[in-house]
């Protein structure tokens, strides 16, 4: 009886060992197959990724800009400009082509937000000895008329806010360029109309009076 029980227990142990061995073999086999599949699929995935990257580059190319190594300096000019005022201006420009009844088909329209600045002052290099005289301890000085030195767009801050192109028309490449040119002219015009030159002249006189006072001329009259 005891021998039969021992035999049964031994059989159970053997069965358990066999079962563990089978399960282990199955797991090892599955792991091996998985590794093999991954190894086989990985080059294909890498190829697909490479192809996708190449197609993306073709559809959305990055421009390559190569400056000419030769630089030509056309002119060197000494400056004695006294910048006395700066305006920062924002202007909205609408540029459009073929608007009207057929605008949705053949039109092209953009809204350009232009931000720029205008700098004005006086050119001290224009002052000559005849422009200053000293009488009875009073210095009489004639400054050059104020002028605009710089009127330009800030390209980093200026942008196309909106653009609408007709379904039967290609966008006009020159439309934004024209808008930028008009914007620059409008920024200068706005500064002039606001009196930038008069303010520049006044600021120049204040600055030069302080300079003359420092040099010992306490009474200064601008003519």
Image: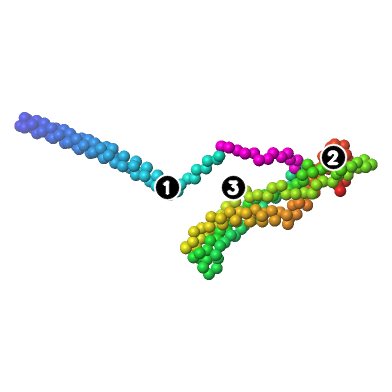
Q: Residue 16 falls in which quadrant of the image?
A: top left
- The answer to whether residue 72 shows anywhere in this view is yes
Q: In this view, does 29 lie above or below 178?
A: above
Foreground label between 1 and 2: 1
**Left or right: 98, with 120 as reference point:** left
Q: Report if residue 217 lies within the magenta region.
A: no
**Prevailing SS of the magenta stretch:** loop
| Contact flag, marks 2 and 3 (Cβ < 8 Å) | no
- The answer to whether residue 161 shows anywhere in this view is no
**Left or right: 62, with 35 as reference point:** right
Q: How crowded is mark 1: few (under 14 residues within 10 Å), some or many (20 or more)?
A: few
Mark closest to the chain's N terminus, 2 or 3? 3
Point 51% across, 60% down: residue: 165
Q: In which quarter of the image is the N terminus?
A: top left
| Residue pointed to by mark 1 | 58
Q: Nearer the viewer, residue 28 or 19?
A: 28
Q: Residue 212 carries which label?
A: 2
Q: Nearer the viewer, residue 122 or 74?
A: 74
Point 73% across, 54% down: residue: 192
Mark closest to the chain's N terminus, 1 or 2? 1
**Left or right: 179, with 86 as reference point:** left
Inter-mark Cα distance, 1 to 2: 65 Å
Residue 183 is situated, as x and y percent measured from the top left of the image, at: 63, 55
- What stretch of residues is rendered in magenta? 69-81
| Residue pointed to by mark 3 | 156
Inter-mark Cα distance, 3 to 1: 27 Å
Residue 157 is situated, as x and y percent measured from the top left of the image, at: 60, 49
Mark closest to the chain's N terminus, 3 or 1? 1
Element marked by disc 3: loop
Q: How crowded is mark 2: few (under 14 residues within 10 Å), some or many (20 or more)?
A: some
Element marked by disc 2: helix
Q: Residues within 10 Å of mark 3 (few under 14, many from 20)?
A: few
């Amino acid at each position: 009886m005891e021998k039969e029980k021992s035999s049964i227990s031994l059989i159970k142990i053997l069965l358990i060992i066999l079962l563990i061995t089978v399960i282990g073999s199955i797991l090892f086999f599955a792991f091996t197959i998985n590794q093999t599949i991954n190894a086989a699929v990985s080059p294909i995935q890498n190829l697909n990724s490479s192809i996708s990257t190449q197609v993306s580059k073709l559809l959305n190319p990055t421009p390559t800009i190569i400056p000419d190594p030769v630089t030509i300096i056309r002119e060197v000019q000494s400056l004695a400009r006294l910048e006395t005022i700066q305006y920062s201006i924002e202007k909205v420009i609408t540029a459009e082509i073929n608007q009207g009844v057929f605008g949705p088909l053949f039109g092209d329209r953009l809204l350009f937000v232009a931000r720029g600045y205008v700098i004005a002052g006086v050119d001290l290099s224009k002052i000559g000895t005849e422009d200053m005289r000293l009488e009875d301890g009073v210095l009489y000085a004639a400054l050059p008329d104020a002028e605009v030195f710089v009127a330009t767009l800030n390209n980093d801050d200026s942008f196309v806010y909106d653009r609408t192109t007709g379904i039967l028309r290609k966008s006009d490449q020159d439309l934004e360029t024209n808008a930028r040119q008009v914007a620059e002219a409008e920024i200068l015009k706005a500064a002039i109309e606001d009196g930038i030159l008069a303010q520049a002249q006044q600021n120049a006189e204040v600055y030069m009076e302080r300079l003359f006072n420092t040099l010992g001329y306490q009474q200064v009259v601008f003519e």
